[in-house]
Image: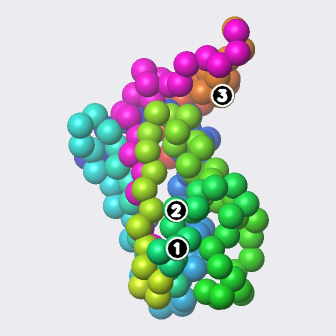
Amino acid sequence: DDLPDVIADKRAFRQIMLNLLSNAIKFTKPGGRIAVTSRVDNMRLHVCVEDNGIGIGASDLPRIGNPFFQARSAYDRRHDGTGLGLSIVKGLVALHGGDMQVNSELGKGTSVSIALPLDCEATKPAKKRGNAPTPFELARKQNEIAVRKSA
């Protein structure tokens, strides 16, 4: 309840959280632990999703978040997917002027942290092609920019 409202694309924020939580659930065995924490620091919302699941090896960490990359199948191949979840998170966070950090240890779990400006509109990326709107501007036009505590 003590978190402020964030000016961001509501649908994108939900997608970020859905991807982070579904990965944590997918890679954590029944009875495992998943924690979601949030705080505000220096006009940025920090959200961390942490699990004690199968983890990611150090050699794979630099590529996490690249499209279609999945950590080595030797970990536990019962986990199918396209390898797009964290790359989508990384891209959406970047479009909002934020950052993503992944920390993990094989067999011990993973922590994915994102940091978003409280006013993502003020830090949105510049237009890239002439007068074409950025994805953030398109979302704003669809009246989806307010992420509220209840969302």
Circle 3 Cα neighbour tier, 10 Å, few/some/many (<14 / 14–19 / ≥20): some
Residue at image point 56% right, 34% down: 95
**Other residues around mark 1 within 10 Å, as few (<14) / some (14–19) / many (≥20):** few
Do tag 2 and tag 1 residues touch (Cβ < 8 Å)? yes
Q: Read off the residue under disc 1.
A: 59
Snapshot colouring: rainbow
Gap between marks 2 and 1 measured at Cα: 7 Å
Q: Is residue 125 left or right of residue 88?
A: left
118 within the magenta span:
yes
Q: Which residues are magenta?
A: 109-130
Question: How far apart, in angstroms, are the residues tagged by discs 1 and 3?
Answer: 33 Å
Image coords of residue 49 (percent x, y): 43, 64
Residue depicted at 74% across the width and 77% down the height: 80
**Mark 3 — residue?**
135
Type of amino acid at the residue the image marks with label 2: Pro
Circle 2 Cα neighbour tier, 10 Å, few/some/many (<14 / 14–19 / ≥20): few
Q: Which image quadrant is residue 27 in?
A: bottom right
Q: Residue at x 53, y 55 (%)?
A: 17
